[in-house]
Amino acid sequence: MPSEPFERGLLTPVTVGHDALVSDAAVLDALVRAECALVAAYAERGVAPRDAAIAVDHAFGLDEKGGSPSATLDVDALVTASVAGGNPVIPLVGMMTQQVPAAHRAWIHRGATSQDILDTALMAVAQRAVEQVRASVGHAAQWLRQLALHHADDVAVARTLTQHAVPTTVGARAATWAQGMERAASRLDALVFPAQLGGAGGTLASFVEITGSAEDAAALPAAFARAAFLDAPDAPWHVTRWPVTELGDALVQALDALGKFAADVATLSRTEIAEVSEGVGGGSSAMPQKQNPAEAVLIRSAALRAPQLGATLHLAASLAVDERPDGAWHAEWPTLRELLRLALGASWHASSLAAHLRVDAAAAARNAGTTGGRIVSERLRGVLVPLVGAERFAELLAGDDDLADRLRALPEADGLDVDALLDPRAYVGLAPRLARGNAGLAAGGGGAAGGGAASGAGAGAAGGGAAAEADETAPDRRDRTGLRANGYGVDE
């Protein structure tokens, strides 16, 4: 007997409610659909009678809207039987054959090998999951772009190697987050999801025999891909696993971008920094004063696991020996599914986090002033070293008191506008333009090169809910980015 489900999300809360697209039920449905698509491909090419495709589709409910094509199968028996052959397709074929009218049973799985069906099914599952991930990543980037516009001129500390470095703006930081997500989204958009149809050894020999000609056999994979709603393969990829590794790489890049965002939010929400806070959730079981960055923590938990999963896919690809791998192929299945699962959950939470993120611009400005003006020491060096020399300049920066008094006491600094020289807003470089995106950078709009107004109120009009840092009654927008029945994310 199959074991009871041991993974319902108890120890992977980032995935809870977001993994239906990659569940065992979804995979089994995809396997059945792949087998039905093969019959449809034969019918399209005039090899199988059209009645066979209609009968097979009807037997598994593919001629009806909704429902599960695998609903009539004994899943427990299938799982148990899959152990003997090492994959679920072998027993699945027997089960499906019994449910098809006798006159059409010969077309189930005809000429195919288990890898054809399983690879095709996993590509179909991945395609739907990636559509959802892409939507959620896109929503998160949109919210962050709005946040960047709203806070394009709000000064903040740029930290390098954990230390205060130079001034930047809150908006420039948010734009950096968005940029990483947008790049990851472009990688997801570029993915292809090819069907697999090569026969036992990847030569399509069985299909030449069945169709009666090399030309018809060569056309069959494209027909199969059309029936499965996938991309047509250039050739069998049984042991050239680039569709899987490229998919894994794109998912890892997406989780990298989400993880960077989450890591910064976790740091910036520390009590002693307090420049951002999550808008929802985050309670503590023992310390009621805390608001933990719960969504950031969940996203990071996924991002930390993703690279190792991607590496496993590459390892499996490099060990895809002979014309059918002996274990490397099998190692891909749960690895790819888990990577998709983490990406689904993390991307949804990132969209929610971006939509609800609250920024305390006053805290960011206050932190920028905690080093007594030393945050602009790079600027000061260019102005003061020619006047006082490098040694005296180093002495001037020593300590942690306010530099303004020290500068005013320097005879060589007489005539300098000390307040303007130490104002971090005057040394943000192109940060406001970067916050406004490439258009602002190219057009030269949005703030002078040396800085801009600290409010950013004008740009904030477009920020909507993403800039709700001061609104404790901001609506909960999580339902806008959730799953719908068709597997797509919905946002406004």
Image: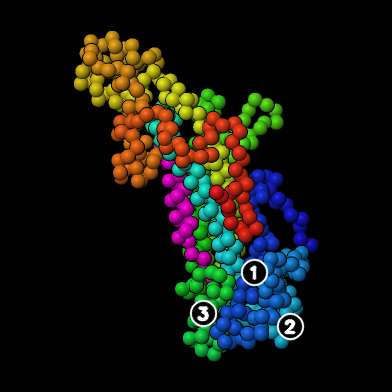
| The quarter of the displayed image where residue 377 is located | top left
Q: Are marks 1 and 3 in contact (CB under 8 Å)?
A: no
Task: Judge depth for marks 2 and 3 and give the one in front.
Answer: 2
Q: Position of residue 166 (x, y in %)?
A: 36, 29
Q: Which residue is mark 2?
A: 101
Q: Position of residue 347 (x, y in %)?
A: 56, 48
Please tell me whether mark 3 sits on a helix, a strand or a loop: loop
State the separation of the CA atoms marked 1 and 2: 19 Å
Q: Which residues are magenta?
A: 170-198
Magenta stretch holds residue 180 = yes
Type of the residue with mark 2? Pro
Locate the N terminus and report the quarter of the image it occupies: bottom right
Q: Main secondary structure of the magenta part?
A: helix
Q: How many marks?
A: 3
Taking the image as drawn, is residue 174 in sight? no
Q: Is residue 491 left or right of residue 375?
A: right
Q: Is residue 169 above or below residue 197?
A: above
Task: Judge depth for marks 1 and 3 and give the one in front.
Answer: 1
Give me the disc on residue 216.
none
Type of the residue with mark 1? Leu
Kindly identify the residue that appears in the image at 70 percent across and 28 percent down: 286
Magenta stretch holds residue 309 = no
Taking the image as drawn, is residue 128 in sight? yes
Give me the disc on residue 203.
3
Q: Which residue is mark 1?
A: 31
Type of the residue with mark 3? Thr
Q: Is residue 424 left or right of residue 133?
A: left
Please tell me whether mark 2 sits on a helix, a strand or a loop: loop
Kindly identify the residue that appears in the image at 60 percent across and 48 percent down: 480
